[in-house]
Image (cartoon, rainbow, N blue to C red):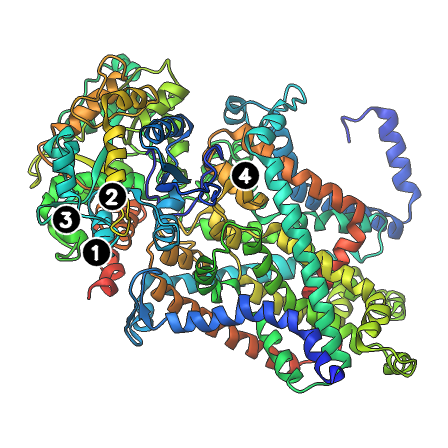
Amino acid sequence: MKKWITGSMALMVVGSVVAGCGNNEESGGEDKVLRIAMGSPGEAMIAVWEEIADEFESANPGVTVEYTFQDDDTYQTVGLPNLLSGNNAPDLYFEWAGERLYNRINDGFAADITTQLEESGLGDMFAEGSYNGMTVDGKTYMIPTAGDVTNVIFYNKQVFDELGIGEPQTWAEFLAACEAVKASGMTPITVGNLDLWTAGNWIGHLLSRVVGEDAYSNALQLEEPFQSDDFVQAYTLVQELWDRGYVNDNINAISDSESDMLFLNGQAAMHPIGSWLVPTALEEAPELEMGYFNLPTIEGGKGDQGSVIGVLNGMVVNAKSSMTDEAIAFMQLYSSDESSAKLSAAGAVPITTTGLDRDNTPELSIRLNDLLAEAPTVVAPPDTGYSIEVANALNTATSQVIGGAKSPADALKQLEETVAPLKK
Amino acid sequence: MLRKASPYLFALPAVLVFAFTILVPIVMTFAFSFYDWNGYGEMRFIGLDNYDRALHDRIYLSSYTHIFIYIAATVVLEVLVGLGLAGLITMGRKGSSLFRVALFTPVMLPMIVVSFLWRFVYNSDFGLINTVLRAVGLDSWTQVWLGNPDTALLAICFVSGWVYAGFYMTIFYSGIQRISKDVYESAYLDGAHEGHIFFRIKVPMIRGLVKTGIMLCVLTGFQSFDLFYVMTNGGPYNSTEIVPTYLVKVVFSHMSTGYGSALAVILTLVIAALGLLANKLGRKGDALEY
Amino acid sequence: MASLPTDLNHRLTSFDQGLTSAKRRKWRSHTLYYLVMVAISCGTFYPLIWLLLSSFRENRDIFMAPFALPEQLNFHNWAEAWRIGNMSTYAKNSVLVTSVTLICILLFASLAAFALSKLKFRGSGLLMLLFAFGLFMPLQSFFIAQSYIFEQLHLKDSYMGLILPYTGVGLPLAIFLLKAYLDSIPKDLMEAARMDGCGDFTLFSRIVLPLLMPSLATVGIFSALNTWNELLLAMLYIQTDALKTIPVGLLAFSSRYMTDYKLLFSALALITLPMIVVYVFFHRYIVAGLTEGAIK
């Protein structure tokens, strides 16, 4: 769940071919097959999924569980639609809450599981807030599996301590921190924006803070223009970051993972990215003391200054599946505390109310989890919350401003031109 | 009876494969272009709306500008440089065949390898180019080559030249080899120097071949994908977006199959028009050699 | 010159004096010529040498001191890239896809070229026109619908899903080249064979095919390299790791190990080296195949 829409199709290795992909039709006999599809969650997680499948199969004789793990970028773009329209469509599949789920519902691929959730008790295993973006007209279409804070600003504690900087609370403090780091000869902020979604998420959050969540959301749905004073004002803050030399000069030339490495190698003091950095950091740079702070408050901003940018995801039951009950039963098993413990051990952060093992989960992950759970307002990232074409256009404008290629007004003007043909 | 059918039987496998993999898809792409369709859901007929949208699509239109810049640059960096190299290796100096074989090497490498290699060469932190510049004290010349819209496209063109200059060189070399020795000898007797021989004899004698080379460079320029996809994927700020990279985004990331089809049809028409034009021009000129 | 040891200096001067001015000019132009050629060759090869050297080093060294030589020729990186990168699988797939595609192209194209060149039949003009059309068409003009068709027919994620389109793309050019060659063969030969009672098929297998061998080599080299290096379709049609060819495999590998430079450099070197070896041994045929294939 580490990555999502990159807009590009850079394909990733599925690591192992453990789970023979899709075409294994050996299961003879009368067995019913429960097909489950998702982007590859990584080898450790795949092992847990397999374990849960074995458990499920022994508890439900006559049902075989079959996984399709595609690499993430493929799954998000061509992969899932192809699977859904194919002959062996999955009964249960991974999706993001919000706009992407709504599209599945519109296309008739998501089952209304409100009653099943109630009757089975599965529905009560999650907090109310975990269903954000999963319900339409009071009907629930998804079983939550995880939540990701898609952007906070991670920082190198050692650097901050040496320079006597605290966690900035306001934008002014944030700029002061950048200045102090820069004065020490280090790059203050590193972002790898080659695929546009990294700065897109971060600055998307900033936009929502300045222009207000409604204006942000409406603009992304093309109901209000991007060209407004508020957007210009927000982008002016972004422009400042480039003009003052606070972000890496190769921001639009390197990928997110290259940027992760710059930060983890101690070559930059701050790195705005999502919660998935925590496990990467523990693996790649265990000695690094890392902290994080949410986007600092922006004075005069029209949005909720305590908002968190994040996205929930979960599993959807295919409306065309004949195995709804089995799918629900499987997810009940997946959401049990026993399974949660296994998931935690594999590095995931379970979303069930009782599943989080607070003693054995990295402290940063727990804090990030709580940040999302307790957020007064959750802002959806452009690329998962809205139409990908509009999101790409906005993220391009963001990359132009943060990369110093265009002034806020020019970038927004061009953005309007780009999205103009999309308005119907 | 069999006699009569046999020509068809001979042609059949080729025709079947060709029709199935190319002709039918071209026709279907044309049909798709009139629909609003995401590739799997419901198809909605919308007439020419997709084409109208294409003509207002800033990124799509600019991708043509980029491809034309790329083609113009590669005609210089590949064909003209190749021509110059061909002149150099046909001066009759010892060891020039070794250079000829050596300079052809990059053509052998898979484009994907070339793309990654040069991505590293251009890397702003540890890349070859910036390191060399720093080493010779030209720090101010260092650039984020692929992250700067002013340099990214040209950087890609340069790589293309690195690969294919040797290729065109080889083509022109074989042309120059066929020029009769007598022509040179009389020129040498007249005391002509190498530059003179190159511009007055070699180039005019293989003019037809040079034209063919330019045509080849233009038409294959439209097919470029790997270099752009791996090195920048259209970025920064769509400044290296070309039709093929944009098409892949529109169809497989935005899931706009209908719209993407319209973009593909327009591209097909543009190439067909250019092909016909090139054919006409080729006929007009002296298409004698080769 | 002043700083040179005196006897060398002396020898050089006398050498210089011994030459007539014309000879000296020639000598200078020779030196200049070789300097230029060596400079150009260095420009061509330096990135490759840098790739090779970097593949022996550690990430931190690549990052911190890009220019230094590796401390030792450490093939550990190569072994690791080969293993982690699944390269043997990709190589196997590439060999398989390329060889089957090659056989299909050569067989189908020579059959068709024979019919189009030596057997008169209705519709042959139209066929030539269609293949000429195919010669110009870029992948982009058909891959959208092709992808859809392959999806419906479950051809994606299978070797056939690559072999079919690669054959289709390679056929027009192959047919043109082979037909052009057959057109240049005098009719008498065929007539004589027919007089002896040869049927069309015997004529093809006994006479035409052997005659075509040199042209088949040209077409084969051209098609094989194109197939070997194809990225776009392979990327769109193959999702299963076990079926990926080298270009897509490398793409997958790189996006996963983007920051593990030593592994990536090693993987690139691993793929590049065999190609260069093949080139060194067969350069004559390869150069001929590629240039003739492209120009005609």
**In the drawing, what numbered circle is on residue A217?**
3
Question: What residue does disc 4 label?
Answer: B121
Q: Give x and y (percent) for residue B284.
A: 65, 83
**In the drawing, what numbered circle is on residue A106?**
1
Q: CA gap, disc 3 to disc 4?
A: 41 Å
Of labels 1 and 2, earlier in sequence is 1
Is the residue A334 above or below the residue A110 in the image? above
Of labels 2 and 3, earlier in sequence is 3
Residue depicted at 39% across the width and 36% down the height: A40
Residue nearest the observer in this picture, C263 or C152: C152
The type of residue carrying mark 1 is Asn
The type of residue carrying mark 2 is Thr
Give the mark toward the camera: 1 or 2: 2
Mark 2 crowd level (few <14, some 14–19, many ≥20, 10 Å Cα): some
Q: Give x and y (percent) for residue B208.
A: 70, 73
Give the mark toward the camera: 2 or 3: 2
Query: In the rendered view, does B74 fall on the left or right side of B239?
Result: right
Asked if the residues shown at circle 1 and circle 4 are in contact, with their CB atoms under 8 angstroms apart, the answer is no
**In the drawing, what numbered circle is on residue A324?**
2
Query: In the rendered view, does A195 fall on the left or right side of C150?
Result: left
Q: CA gap, disc 3 to disc 1?
A: 20 Å
Q: Are marks 3 and 4 on the same chain?
A: no
Q: Give x and y (percent) for residue B191.
A: 85, 65
Asked if the residues shown at circle 3 and circle 4 are in contact, with their CB atoms under 8 angstroms apart, the answer is no
Q: Residue furthest bottom?
A: C122
Q: Is residue C135 visible?
A: no
